Amino acid sequence: MSSAAIEKPNRRDFLYIATAAVGAVGVGGVVWPLIDQMNPDASTLALSSIEVDLAPIAEGQIVTVKWRGGPVFVRHRTKKEIDDAVNTPLAGLRDPQTDQARVKKPEWLIVSGVCTHLGCVPLGHEGQYDGWKCPCHGSVYDTSGRIRQGPAPLNLPVPEYAFLSETRVKIG
Amino acid sequence: MSGSPTYVPKSALGRWFESRLPIMGLVHSSFVAFPVPRNLNYLWTFGAILAFMLGAQIVTGIILAMHYVPSATLAFASVEHIMRDVNYGWLIRYLHTNGASMFFLAVYIHMFRGIYYGSYKAPREVLWILGVIIYLLMMATAFMGYVLPWGSMSFAGATVITNLFTAIPLVGTGVAHWLWGGYAVGDPTLNRFFSLHYLLPFMIVGVVILHVWALHVAGQNNPDGVEVQNVERDTVAFTPYATIKDLFGVSIFLILYAWFVFYIPTYLLDADNSVPANPLVTPAHIVPEWYLLPFYAILRAIPNKLVGVVALAAAIILLAFLPWLDTSKVKSGKYRPAFRIFFWLFVVCCVGLGYLGSQEVSDTTTWIARILAIGYFGFLVVALPVLGLIERTKPLPASIADAVLAKTKPAEAAAPPASR
């Protein structure tokens, strides 16, 4: 082989690069629909909101409603549960958030019912803090749905919701 | 009676065909004349047992797919329909569900065999890695198959396993939504799992072909871990010696399989899976199928989500690196007294983790699981590399023939292998 004689790029090199570039774009254009078809489809995206009647939910009761295929907890909190949540010092929390930041009205806590560890549905009125306890891997949430013990990294998320009236709430 | 080493077609048609597609010659050289070490024990019949189980799962699976409906509203009822209405549907479904367990039982024995006898060492590294890929594909297939009946444990299993991906920083949730085709496990998830559950076994077949190909390039390892030096003295022909022995091994294994299917068909199933899936309720005590329990225990033993998922993945992926983690030049555990102790401790760790994975979480089980998980990883990344450097191994036999003949009487020692 001859030593490092650097040749000037010629028309052949240009054609190779141009062909490869167009080919890459073409392959990408074909592959993307094959991947994207697995994402949530139009009918799934359309099911974006539900309305919940709060009137029949007694104080202390937790109701599970289905929103976007998964559970949402609507909890009518007692005075003690609200006080416990409000009086928890933030310093000890894994995902620090005040109780006020997680509710619109203190007596109504609305949180996703999907454990932030691996997606099981936690059981209400269980665990050391009387909030929720996940049966799968033992994550414990308090009466504000905040993570207190176990492997879950985050608080139960608060979905977007708005009070339509005193007794009616729209989730999503 | 080992027959001709090369294939000679006996008929004119055979000669005509062989000169156009030499497939009979390939079969002959791979499964008839192929030389196998003469010292193989019954642990070497598990390759054939696994091939049989793969075939059995594909046949029963294709039949089940004729009657099953992959829809969240109809799947559970269609499985009940198979159990109650379809002719012999109960038999075919029990063969398939218990077949999965038998498949894993055989693969675990096959893998522990490979570890004990150092079958992953040069020149069989690629052979071993192909095996690890088959194992990964098996786990994916079994997991998706478990989701199909759409019982409450199916749903919880699908939720937990797909949620493992949410541990990935930034893109995790997007990946999970992409896998689900929604915001939670649902109808689209079930449909695609059915599609993939049908596809993956054929991918396993493809990798099995590569696995057997790699095996036939390197030749089989053997209980003494010394390579074949003299084909005449050290080996026997695959047919009839290995063929008949494999058939006998498969037959014994079939007795165990049949015992499960006919006497305790639901022993390995979970009662909670006889309850239809409900996205709003998770069963009080969720457990994966037995063959995934050790990894589940490792996941639960770690209090941090991301680290737990990484450890779970590492526990499986590390197996692919065994050829380089194990620094000993001596293959067989027969000649490695210190390795033997650690090997059995490793087995105890695996079985112990499996047991703990089936139990409810408590502080005690978590701590024992942590100790056993340290044992599991310790064997792979500490014991294997260090043992190779410090262990005093026993002297190896000069050849396979010497190892075999040392066990027999001197008078027989002179006899050639073919007359045995």
Image: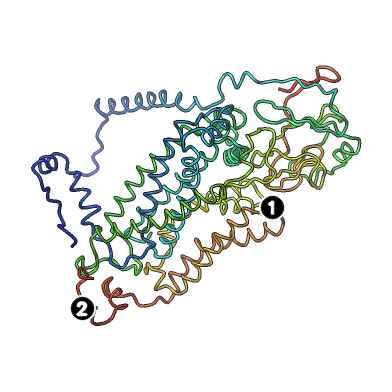
Question: What distance separates the C-alpha of mark 2 from that of mark 1?
Answer: 61 Å
The answer for which chain carries disc 1 is: B
Q: Is residue B35 visible?
A: yes
For the point 26% across and 37% down, the residue is A6
* Image location of residue B134, percent across then percent down: 41, 47
- Which residue lies at the image location 69% right of the left edge and 26% below the top edge? A67
Instruction: Say what secondary structure mark 2 lies in.
Output: loop
Quadrant in the picture for the N terminus of chain A: top left
Location of residue B252 with respect to A73 vertically, above or below: below
The residue depicted at 63 percent of the width and 58 percent of the height is B369
Q: Is A132 placed above or below A102 here?
A: below
The residue lying furthest to the bottom in this view is: B410
Task: Rate crowding at label 1 as few (under 14), some (14 to 19) or many (20 or more) other CA atoms within 10 Å.
Answer: some
Q: Secondary structure at mark 1?
A: loop
Residue A45 image-quadrant placement: top right
**Quadrant occupied by the C terminus of chain A:** top right
Residue count near mark 2 (Cα–Cα under 10 Å), binned few <14, some 14–19, many ≥20: few
**Above or below, comparing residue B381 to residue A20 in the picture:** below
Amino acid type, label 2: Ala
Tell me the subunit letter for badge 2.
B
Image coordinates of residue B379 in percent, x first then y, are 51, 63
Quick check: B340 left or right of A19? right
